[in-house]
């Protein structure tokens, strides 16, 4: 029964250890947060984006996004497009007939649109657009266009992207084309598109 | 494929303008009076919302702590739980959350080029800070994952202590693995295998939705299975909660040891008063402790060795390493054909040697990380073993410091609380009712 004063001491010791650990923990947490936040200057906040030079248009973007309708859409780089009549991104080449009937189009949802611009030396010129609400990001047109100039490419559209902490498409991407990019320059261009745009800038 | 190529060649011939300077590309025709349209690039959705989330988080944490510790109101906590489920879960779609933020922090430490957003850092730090002072009030009614499980815990059964303790070690190991994979830039496995975020969005892969369904069904019988046996952030909060300044108390003032709250906790966090230890037990405990200390170097040795061995297999989860191995196989003609990944690699024109060097570097990093992971697992095991022999002295029914998630379900069971609320005259009333019940 001499345990009583002993007990008291015991509780005090535990309480002391607890207080010490808590104070140390709080200081560590604050310091840690400060250090991590202080390093923020080295890079910006990030969003997900596809590097079009690495993308192999495997089609995973259409199916793996957590959104029912993928945040990835095809994008037209107009400066790169040669405005061909026989666009391999527009027509399904396995069809012989070159009419714009649905069965001859490559896009499963008819999201690639074209408008007639002018006729030069007997060659009709068309501008190709992506009708974004209809695009499912399957990349079929991108794959077709790659046979020519490759002006079509896939990009994460940031008005739709939820910016998940771990992008579900990035996990499924076979070629590591998905990566985090700074939020203040959230889109990427193909290397050759960059060259064309640069040249255009120099000329202007 | 050949048909296609022929057609493309035909098309190339048909198409007229082939510029001299770029041979592989058709140049864009210049058409008088027509200007090239510009593509539209929508800005990222407002990140300001993230900071609103941090503010909501801070307010919710404050309210949860107030409701659990001061007002002692299960009803208020319950309403806050529903609010958090709706706001953080269904409206903000469960991303980013505190649980996942562990990985962003680990990545920021492992990769200096990665900038962590202040909002994510807030999600990581705030609940930990609050837990250091008020216990796990975050878990009670702020975390949306906890909230959804809190609502389905309708028929909780008691998990045997040995099982509860053993399964309770998983979160620490999961935490270690998540940190390793995040810091090496491999993947965010917590997010990848988060069962509930798919539920909040009503979309996601079928496997994850099935997993979410399983967790909900199990959660009906075993209270909060994810929180108790998986949640890596919960593991951190558990540690912080053990030294918290204030914590949830079952009785409002003094415990009268009436045993009415004994089975009240659906999460098995109520600890009964201890019985006086007999000398025999004390000796056994002492021997056990000594044995654990003697075994500790062996445990550490084995775990660190095993962790080091795990390094290479773990590194294969990194796409760069998988790619390098495949490219090597293709280079040495051990496999035929290419994959999407290697095709993409060859397209980029990146030299093989650079890829191999990067993969070797990753091997090294994973082996180092493996040693640390092994040491961490060993530490968890040794501490858990020592804890089984630690003597605790409790004179009243208390909520376990680490395991209590401050849900407040036990308040109602305490007769002293009912007296405080003015529902009964004295504690004897409640105890009498209990003693009249059969069994």
Image (cartoon, coloured by chain):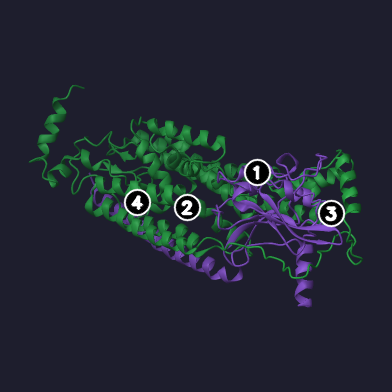
Mark 1 — on which chain does it sit?
A
Tell me the colour chain B is drawn in: green
Circle 2 residue: B97
State the CA–CA distance, disc 3 to disc 4: 52 Å
Do callouts 1 and 4 point to residues on the same chain?
no
Residue B382 appears anywhere in the view? no
Q: Position of residue B87 (x, y in %)?
A: 39, 51
Q: Residue at x 49, y 47 (%)?
A: B232
Q: Nearer the viewer, residue B430 or A155?
A: A155
Tell me the colour chain A is drawn in: purple
Circle 4 residue: B137
Q: Nearer the viewer, residue A103 or B427?
A: A103
Callout 3 crowding tier (Cα within 10 Å): few <14, some 14–19, many ≥20: some
Q: Quadrant of the C terminus of chain B?
A: top left
- Residue B231 in the figure: left or right of residue B420: right
Q: Residue at x 76, y 48 (%)?
A: A143
Do callouts 4 and 2 point to residues on the same chain?
yes
Circle 1 residue: A109
Element under label 2?
loop
Mark 4 — on which chain does it sit?
B
Q: Residue at x 77, y 44 (%)?
A: A99
Residue B182 appears anywhere in the view? yes
Circle 3 residue: B352
Element under label 3?
helix
Q: Position of residue A181 (x, y in %)?
A: 64, 61
Callout 4 crowding tier (Cα within 10 Å): few <14, some 14–19, many ≥20: many
State the CA–CA distance, disc 4 to disc 2: 16 Å
Element under label 4?
helix
């Amino acid at each position: 029964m001499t345990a009583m004063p002993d007990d008291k001491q015991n509780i005090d010791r535990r309480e002391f250890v607890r207080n010490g650990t808590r104070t140390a923990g709080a200081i560590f947490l604050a310091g840690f947060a400060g250090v991590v936040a202080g390093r923020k200057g080295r890079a910006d906040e990030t969003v997900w984006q596809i590097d079009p030079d690495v993308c192999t248009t495997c089609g995973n973007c259409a199916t793996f996004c957590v959104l029912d309708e993928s945040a990835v859409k095809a994008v037209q780089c107009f400066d790169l497009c040669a405005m061909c009549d026989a666009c391999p991104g527009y027509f399904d080449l396995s069809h012989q007939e070159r009419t714009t009937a649905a069965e001859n189009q490559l896009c499963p949802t008819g999201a690639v649109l074209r408008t007639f611009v002018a006729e030069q030396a007997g060659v009709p010129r068309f501008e190709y657009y992506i009708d974004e609400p209809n695009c499912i990001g399957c990349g079929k047109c991108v794959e077709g266009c790659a046979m020519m100039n490759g002006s079509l490419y896939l990009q994460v559209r940031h008005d739709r992207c939820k910016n998940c902490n771990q992008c579900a498409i990035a996990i499924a991407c076979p070629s590591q084309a998905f990566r985090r990019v700074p939020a203040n320059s959230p889109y990427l261009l193909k290397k050759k598109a960059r060259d064309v745009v640069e040249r255009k800038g120099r000329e202007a | 494929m050949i048909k296609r190529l022929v057609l493309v060649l035909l098309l190339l011939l048909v198409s007229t303008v082939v510029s001299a300077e770029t041979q592989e590309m058709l140049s864009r025709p210049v058409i008088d009076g027509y200007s090239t349209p510009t593509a539209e690039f929508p800005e990222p959705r407002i990140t300001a919302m993230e900071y609103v989330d941090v503010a909501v988080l801070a307010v919710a944490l404050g309210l949860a702590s107030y409701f659990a510790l001061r007002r002692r109101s299960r009803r208020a906590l319950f309403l806050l739980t529903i609010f958090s489920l709706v706001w953080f879960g269904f409206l903000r779609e469960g991303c980013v959350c505190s649980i996942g933020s562990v990985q962003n922090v680990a990545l920021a430490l492992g990769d200096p080029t990665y900038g962590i957003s202040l909002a994510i850092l807030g999600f990581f730090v705030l609940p930990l800070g609050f837990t250091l002072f008020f216990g796990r009030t975050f878990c009670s009614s702020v975390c949306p994952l906890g909230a959804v499980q809190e609502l389905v815990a309708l028929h909780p059964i008691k998990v045997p202590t040995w099982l509860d303790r053993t399964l309770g070690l998983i979160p620490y190991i999961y935490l270690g693995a998540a940190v390793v994979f995040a810091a090496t830039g491999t993947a965010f496995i917590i997010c990848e295998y988060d069962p509930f975020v798919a539920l909040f969005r009503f979309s996601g892969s079928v496997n994850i939705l099935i997993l979410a369904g399983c967790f909900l069904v199990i959660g009906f019988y075993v209270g909060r299975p994810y929180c108790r046996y998986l949640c890596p952030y919960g593991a951190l909060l558990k540690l912080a909660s053990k030294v918290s300044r204030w914590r949830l108390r079952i009785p409002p003032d003094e415990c009268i040891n009436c045993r009415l709250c004994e089975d009240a906790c659906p999460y098995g966090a109520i600890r009964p008063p201890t019985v006086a230890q007999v000398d025999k037990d004390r000796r056994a405990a002492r021997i056990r402790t000594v044995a654990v200390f003697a075994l500790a170097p062996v445990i550490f040795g084995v775990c660190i060795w095993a962790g080091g061995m795990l390094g290479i297999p773990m590194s294969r989860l990194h796409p760069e390493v998988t790619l390098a191995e495949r490219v090597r196989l293709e280079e040495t003609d051990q496999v035929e054909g290419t994959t999407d990944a290697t095709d993409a690699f060859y397209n980029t024109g990146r030299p093989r040697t650079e890829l191999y060097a990067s993969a070797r570097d990753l091997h090294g990093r994973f082996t180092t990380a493996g040693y640390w992971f092994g040491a961490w697992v060993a530490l968890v095991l040794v501490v858990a073993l020592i804890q089984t022999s630690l003597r605790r002295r409790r004179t009243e029914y208390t909520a376990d410091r680490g395991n209590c998630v401050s849900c407040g379900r036990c308040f109602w069971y305490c007769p002293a609380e009912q007296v405080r609320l003015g529902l009964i005259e004295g504690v004897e009333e409640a105890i009498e009712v209990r003693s009249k019940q059969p069994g």
